[in-house]
Image: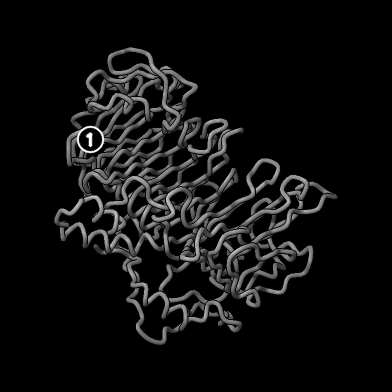
Amino acid sequence: MKNLFLLSSFLIVMMFLSSCVNEVTIDSHEGTEEKNECLSDCPPPNNVSDQYLRQSNFDLPLCVHKGSGRDIQVGPGKAYENISNVDWNNLIAGDTVRIFWKSTAYNERFLIKGKGTKDQPIRICGVPSDNGDLPIISGENALLRSDLDFGGYAPMQNLGVITIYDSTWKSRPANISIEGLHLKSAHPSYSFYRTNTNPDTYETGAAGIRIQEGENISIRGNIIEDCGNGIFAMSKSDNREALSENLLIEGNHIFNNGVSGRDREHNLYIQGINVTYQYNYFGRNKAGSLGGNLKDRSAGTIIRYNYFEGHQRFLDLVEVQDHENWVLESEYINSLAGGTPDPEQIAFIRDVYLNYQKAYVYGNLLKIKGSIDGRLLIHWGNDSIPENTRKGTLYFYHNTVSIESDQNTHWNMTLFDISTIEESVECFNNIVHIKSETAGESASTLNLTRSGVNGALNLGRNWISNGYINGGGTVNGLNNLLNVIDGDTPIDLITLKLTNDSTAGGNAQILPLYLDNIIFEYAAHQSNKERTNLVDIGAYAK
């Protein structure tokens, strides 16, 4: 399987040794845009042609029909007044369903089971009002078209405003794009009507968009709120068509999701293969909910150029749970109970596993308020199935983390929770700033790593506020950190951009060749712009 970031473990080790990320002396830019020269066994340049991994400007296309299929218009005065008038079971490649804004919500839900092609996707898009308001689709008291094919599993109807699912064995939806909609209220506090018109309530894990399985799915420029999960993607071990592969989650505003008192629902909960999150605005979850902002159990995870407001964990990047037979060779072999392995599946698993051992987090903005947010920020490894742990490296670079927290609220705030000795984090060119939230109070102590864990944090050049402590595990490269004056604030605490005299300016180390370059910056909100230089530390250039 061809993948942008497929490298052997041996090459990763050799490249880190040659690029000196964790040694005392680190090459800086000195005003240039050059990268470190690789000494030997250099990987080839990244191929940026794949639409689900490439870095490109975010430009949500107008909701106009361009495909070879039908232009299906929904709304007041249109051919289809209601969403349920559309024959959702029979969408084909090149079809566009255009849902026009109206002054009240569409209290309707639908299922997508069709297959587009890469050149002729199936598009479901919203046509906004003259003021730019997106059409609202609400799960509250929502109707379902009577012939929607949810298959024989009755609770499948309880799981989403939009559900992407084909109940046919070894068949999955493909090449679907959902754009420019305001989705809300798939939550256990609301009721809906089943296909047989009987009333029912949502499951706790109901989502604005539920991807039960699918390939090449794009979710772009939407607002998703007031659900159990904002977006949920499932992958299962049954067969390859039961996987969610090649997901692009781009330019959305996702917030106010979760269930009070529960830690199992999140703004995003994604189990997939090859997932890119970019240009999104991730707000806080519902008050009283205990879930995280982004929980990911995927192989091939890229998180870049997003804006995160806190909740419990910002990023929870942990082990596979339901599709381990397509990621872990040992699990697949065990499932055969002595049967003969499929050589094609073995080859697929081996490629995917190399990607499972790596995740890339860069160019993001993270903003934490201790009075309303949790104290554990970024988790890498596992949370419930230790034998499935990641056993690899999280690459965390050119991010800006702003923490405002009082010690009488959280004695400490922990940057990284690295589960086992088999996991590590490569951390460089980041800003991590911490101050008290309340004037006159002492700021929480910053723990670089969580106490009681055994993973390794390898520090390159970073701007980190004074007063941190190491925490647990192994912390290497402390002498690479910039000398920071107590009370120095390198960023504007509202915009998170560098101040004019920021000591983070001009001090970035050169990126190793095997990592994606920093091409863009997050633009408030839900967009991006080109970055002007790579010499400044953090998510923004001066």
In the rendered image of this protein, does residue 474 appear above or below residue 232? below
The extreme right residue here reads 440
The extreme front residue here reads 338
- Residue at (37, 39) in percent of width and height: 179
From the top left corner, tell me how far across and down residue 404 is, in percent.
71, 51
- Quadrant where the C terminus sits is bottom right
In the rendered image of this protein, does residue 538 appear above or below residue 493? below
Query: Which color scheme did the rendering employ for the protein?
Result: one colour
Say left or right for 75 vs 502. left
Quadrant of res 504: bottom right
Say left or right for 27 vs 92. right
Q: Residues within 10 Å of mark 1 (few under 14, many from 20)?
A: many
- Residue at (63, 59) in percent of width and height: 451
From the top left corner, tell me how far across and down residue 198 is, in percent.
33, 12
- Quadrant where the N terminus sits is bottom left
Quadrant of res 284: top right
Say left or right for 237 vs 141. left
- Residue at (68, 50) in percent of width and height: 494
Mark 1 lies on residue: 166
Residue 462 or 348: which is nearer the viewer?
348
Which amino acid does the dot numbered 1 rest on? Asp
Q: Secondary structure at mark 1?
A: loop
Residue 261 or 281: which is nearer the viewer?
261
In the rendered image of this protein, does residue 203 appear above or below residue 28? above
From the top left corner, tell me how far across and down residue 24 is, in percent.
61, 82
In the rendered image of this protein, does residue 200 appear above or below residue 404? above
From the top left corner, tell me how far across and down residue 355 is, in percent.
35, 62
- Residue at (14, 56) in percent of width and height: 340
The extreme bottom residue here reads 39
How many badges with numbers are in the image?
Answer: 1
